[in-house]
Amino acid sequence: MKNEQELKDIVKDRYAKIAEQGKAENAASCCGATTPSNKVYNIMMDDYSETGGYVEDADLGLGCGLPTHFAKIEKGDTVIDLGSGAGNDCFVARHETGAEGKVIGIDFTPIMVQKARTNAEKLGYNNVEFREGDIDAMPVSDNVADVIVSNCVLNLVPNKLKVIGEIYRTLKPGGHFSISDIVLVGNLPDALKEDAEMYAGCVAGAIQKDEYLQFIKDAGFNNIQIQKEKSIVIPDDILEKYLSSEEVKTFNNAGTGIFSITVYAEKAGTKQEKPKMKMADLQDDSSCCEPTSGCC
């Protein structure tokens, strides 16, 4: 397998191309990054269409879960989305945190950041911003976020332990995360593990489920829970790009599990209550006439 920087460059290149595709093209491939399967469906994604705040133009079909659905976002929260893409999870988070909250999306692909900013401007969302940067060195200060979400992104980062450390650093005491990701139970064949397309396609970069959860525990998080888990089956016509027919049969019977999991965990500490808005803060006396006149 290539070194850390080479892997990052591969992912950045693939996702820059994905940003220029439509959702239909992405949905015909493994996590949007490989040659389309003739089954023509995305093997990772969940359906957002009934989710509040969903923006179709911002949905490139690249996720493997619905982390915002499980993230327990409250009004006024500050939310960070790791690997924000065209902005869909940020806009769903904004629906939950409201105009009084703040949402920060981080992505290291410049064209994705620009696409997300354009979408935010169209929607008139002044409290959603997108920053270009690596999620293993977030362009965010310490103790900023109430909630962190991410959708099928950590598996694309070579140094996952460093990312989890960054999540801990940027969460406020008592804050929490809800992250959807791809993990393994058992081993992938070398032909899959060593292929750059399968890495960018969210499979080869996945680590063992137990190791993933141990990283979270070792970082100091509490109350670790798996909120959702679903099995991912790679269609044979994708596997046959890398394996012989006999190897495909062996792999399918080997008991190796590829799973999308949504993981929740909390940072130690006491969560501070957000200040409540006062009526005086909501009323602009300079532009409001006397109540008796009927205009207020």
Image (cartoon, rainbow, N blue to C red):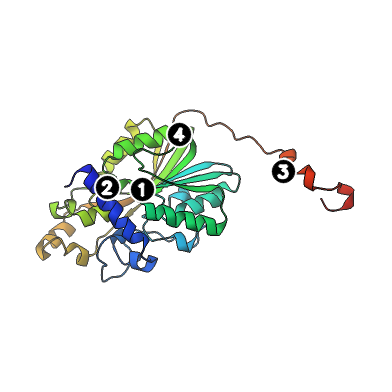
Q: Pinpoint residue 276: horizontal percent, then vertical percent.
A: 66, 37
Asked whether the residues under the numbered discs 1 and 4 touch, taking CB atoms below 8 Å apart as contact, a structural biologist would say no
Q: In the rendered view, would you say 245 is above or below 132?
A: below
Give the CA separation, mark 2 to mark 1: 9 Å
Q: Pinpoint residue 5: horizontal percent, then vertical percent.
A: 24, 44
Residue at the image point whose x is 46% and y is 63% from the top: 57
Q: Secondary structure at mark 1?
A: loop
Mark 3: few, some, or many residues within 10 Å (few <14, many ≥20)? few
From the viewer's perspective, is 218 left or right of 93? left
Give the CA separation, mark 1 to mark 4: 17 Å
Nearest to the observer: residue 255 or residue 173: 173
* Residue 222 visible in this rendered orientation of the protein: no
Asked whether the residues under the numbered discs 3 and 1 touch, taking CB atoms below 8 Å apart as contact, a structural biologist would say no
Give the CA separation, mark 3 to mark 1: 37 Å
The numbered dot on residue 282 is 3
Asked whether the residues under the numbered discs 2 and 1 touch, taking CB atoms below 8 Å apart as contact, a structural biologist would say yes
The numbered dot on residue 8 is 2
Q: Pinpoint residue 184: horizontal percent, then vertical percent.
A: 25, 48
Give the CA separation, mark 4 to mark 3: 29 Å
Q: Pinpoint residue 160: horizontal percent, then vertical percent.
A: 29, 40
Q: Amino acid at mark 2?
A: Lys
Q: Secondary structure at mark 2?
A: helix
Asked whether the residues under the numbered discs 4 and 3 touch, taking CB atoms below 8 Å apart as contact, a structural biologist would say no
Mark 2: few, some, or many residues within 10 Å (few <14, many ≥20)? some
* Residue 15 visible in this rendered orientation of the protein: yes
Q: Amino acid at mark 1?
A: Phe
Q: How many marks?
A: 4
Disc 1 target residue: 108
> Of circles 3 and 1, which is in front?
1
Disc 4 target residue: 141
